[in-house]
Amino acid sequence: MPDVTPTGPLSLPFEQAALILAACNTFQSVCGVASASLAREKIYYPYYDLGEKDNAWPIPGIIINDDDMNQQFMNRNLDQGGSLLVTFCFPVNENYVSENGEIEPENQILDFRNKLGAILNEMLALANTPNPDTNLCYLHVTRWEKWSTPVLLSSPHAAEEMMHAAFVLEWVA
């Protein structure tokens, strides 16, 4: 979590996205925590250096970056909008690892997709509703789009086996 307080139209969307994702019960469950504030500690923005960390993804965790394929805007009326790239990094579900330690890829990926779908639905339900922990509403997420297929990553792409997917979140303010 950054030490600098996000202010203004280029940094607040990151913090607001982190807050809405942390408020999702399914993400809290994946992290093994019981509050949004504890889940927030597992969300990284606007920078996470995999090279510096020897391909150690934040597991469980979420990385939020700019979506360079789409625009972020503000007009004279102070209408704002844009998109963010959200990368989900989840541990392998031990329920789908055989007794001899072999991962069951079909079950892992379906389980991961179920969790992602739940988080995306929870996020859309929270969008633009009052956040009880702040004086603001949650980020007004208007749409999500799958950017990379949910997969099981292993060496050399990850320091440990993990579930990985990326989505673009579109928002307006």
Image (cartoon, helix red, strand yellow):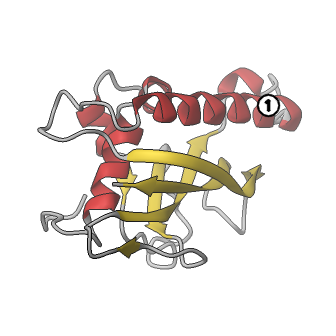
- Residue 73 relative to residue 109: left or right: left
State the image coordinates of residue 35 (x, y, percent, origin top left): 28, 25
In the rendering, at what x and y percent does residue 94 appear? 67, 26
Specify whether residue 101 is in view: no
- Residue at 76%, 25% in the rendered image: 96
Between residues 22 and 155, which one lies in front from this camera angle? 22
Foreground pick, 154 / 16: 16
Image quadrant assignment for residue 168: bottom right
The answer to whether residue 63 is above or below residue 93 is below
Viewport quadrant of the C terminus: bottom left
Question: Going by the image, does 122 lie left or right of 12?
Answer: right
Compared with 159, 35 (above or below) is above
Q: Is residue 11 above or below residue 137?
A: below
Q: Is residue 144 left or right of residue 11?
A: right
Pick the front one: 126 or 46: 126
Q: Which residue is mark 1?
A: 110
Residue 164 placement (x, y as % from top left): 66, 51
